[in-house]
């Protein structure tokens, strides 16, 4: 039996395969009648809240001819201390793939280690690779290839920032991260990017970061599980994306946000709801990009 095709992180999948998955997502977006996963089951474990991930995966697997089983941590035996390893072994006897959203990335890796079916990362505290697949798809639908473009991240060094770094290397774009020095990206991620030769710049100057950008992205100042909300908001206020910063970018620059958004915090309503914002296409593309992920993971 060949090893399962996990989708754990963008830097675990080679660039050519990521492109194949995106192309698959795009073709499934065009042909909504295709059902390559007829009769297949996807278990989804949620130990953190979700709107987009939960609905887009469930609708996606249904559209592909399969079905989804949702397990909320507290209502399953996982919530009562059954190990991730045993859960992985048992679920592998019932379903064809497992998606997990959890705080601890170790749980994702344990699940992948002990499952004999593909495991998909639906967000951990460390990364959010499915979101990046949708983001790249969205940029390219609007502006063509993302290769060589300047992408600017304004925010903390959170899970989304990490997946943007992985994506910059894999999809060949230049990434400038405007991040307060108190909330940095984990150094091992930057070390990886450097070793891979990725074009990554880290600065505390958000204006310089936004200058000449092709795409500006941000995220909530307080991620799920962050305790120090007040302090984080104070540190991140100077990194807010507003109309002035969008004007520093190229005239055809786009704005993206993985959502949920907080108007007048990380981004002004003027930008979030303005003409350069493609957030609703981005949210829709979670569905299409993940259909590509599901079809790839579950194919022979
Ligand atoms: N962007 C994203 O993952 O949204 P949810 O938390 O609603 O799934
Ligand atoms: N950084 C955010 C992303 C939500 C989709 C969080 O982890 O809460």
Image: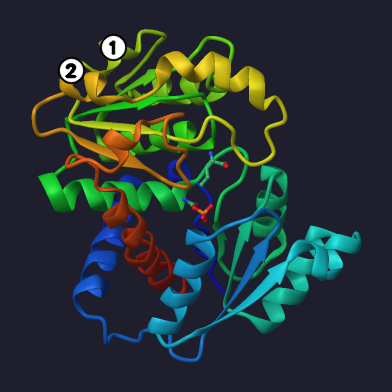
Furthest residue in direction right, as rendered: 80
Distance from the alpha carbon under mark 2 to that under mark 1: 7 Å
252 relative to 93, above or below:
above
Query: Residue 187: x percent and y percent?
Result: 55, 18
Which quadrant of the view contains residue 88? bottom right
Residue at point 86%, 69% (across, down)? 77
Indicate the position of residue 11 as horizontal and vertical percent values: 45, 41
Q: Which residue is mark 2?
A: 248
Indicate the quadrant where residue 172 lies. top left
Relative vertical location of residue 278 with respect to residue 188 in this rendering, above or below: below
- Residue lying at the far left in this picture: please name it: 251
Q: Which is nearer the N-term, disc 2 or disc 1?
A: 1
Side (left or right) of 152 relative to 5: left
Ligand 2 rendered quadrant:
top right
- Contact check, label 2 and label 1, Cβ < 8 Å: yes
Q: Is residue 11 left or right of residue 18?
A: right
Label for residue 48?
none
Q: Can residue 286 be seen at all in this image of the molecule?
A: yes
- Quarter of the C terminus within the rendering: bottom left
Under tag 2, what secondary structure? helix
Point 17% across, 42% down: residue: 275
Numbered disc 1: secondary structure: helix
Name the residue located 79 percent from the left edge and 61 percent from the top edge: 85
Q: Which residue is mark 1?
A: 207
How far across and how far down the image is residue 33, in percent? 27, 87
Tell me which residue sits at (12%, 25%) in the image.
Answer: 250
Residue placed most toward the observer, 113 or 129: 129
Near mark 1 (Cα within 10 A), the count class, few <14, some 14-19 or many ≥20, is some
Query: Looking at the image, can residue 144 be seen?
Result: no
Give 29 or 167, whichever is nearer the viewer: 29
Image x and y of residue 260, in percent: 48, 47
- Quarter occupied by the N terminus: bottom right
């Amino acid at each position: 039996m060949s090893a399962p095709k996990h989708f754990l992180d963008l830097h675990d999948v080679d660039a050519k395969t990521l492109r194949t998955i995106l192309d698959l997502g795009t073709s499934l977006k065009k042909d909504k009648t295709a059902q390559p996963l007829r009769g297949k089951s996807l278990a989804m474990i949620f130990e953190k809240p979700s709107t987009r991930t939960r609905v887009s995966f469930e609708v996606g697997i249904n559209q592909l001819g399969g079905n989804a089983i949702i397990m909320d941590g507290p209502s399953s035996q996982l919530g009562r201390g059954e190990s991730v390893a045993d859960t992985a072994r048992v679920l592998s006897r019932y379903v064809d793939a497992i998606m997990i959203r959890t705080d601890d990335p170790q749980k994702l890796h344990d699940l992948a280690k002990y499952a004999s079916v593909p495991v998909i990362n639906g967000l951990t505290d460390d990364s959010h690779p499915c979101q990046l697949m949708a983001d790249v798809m969205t940029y390219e639908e609007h502006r063509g290839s993302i290769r060589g473009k300047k992408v600017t991240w304004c925010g903390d060094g959170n899970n989304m920032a990490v997946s943007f770094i992985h994506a910059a290397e894999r999809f060949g774009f230049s990434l400038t991260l405007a991040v307060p020095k108190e909330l940095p990206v984990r150094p091992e991620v930057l070390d990886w990017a450097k070793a891979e030769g990725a074009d990554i710049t880290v600065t505390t100057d958000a204006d310089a970061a936004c200058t000449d950008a092709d795409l500006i992205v941000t995220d909530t100042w307080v991620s799920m599980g962050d305790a120090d909300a007040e302090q984080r908001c104070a540190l991140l206020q100077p990194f807010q994306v507003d109309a002035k910063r969008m004007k520093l970018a190229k005239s055809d620059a786009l704005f993206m946000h993985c959502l949920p958004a907080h108007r007048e915090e990380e981004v002004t309503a003027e930008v979030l709801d303005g003409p350069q914002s493609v957030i609703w296409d981005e949210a829709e593309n979670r569905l299409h990009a993940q259909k590509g992920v599901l079809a790839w993971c579950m194919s022979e």
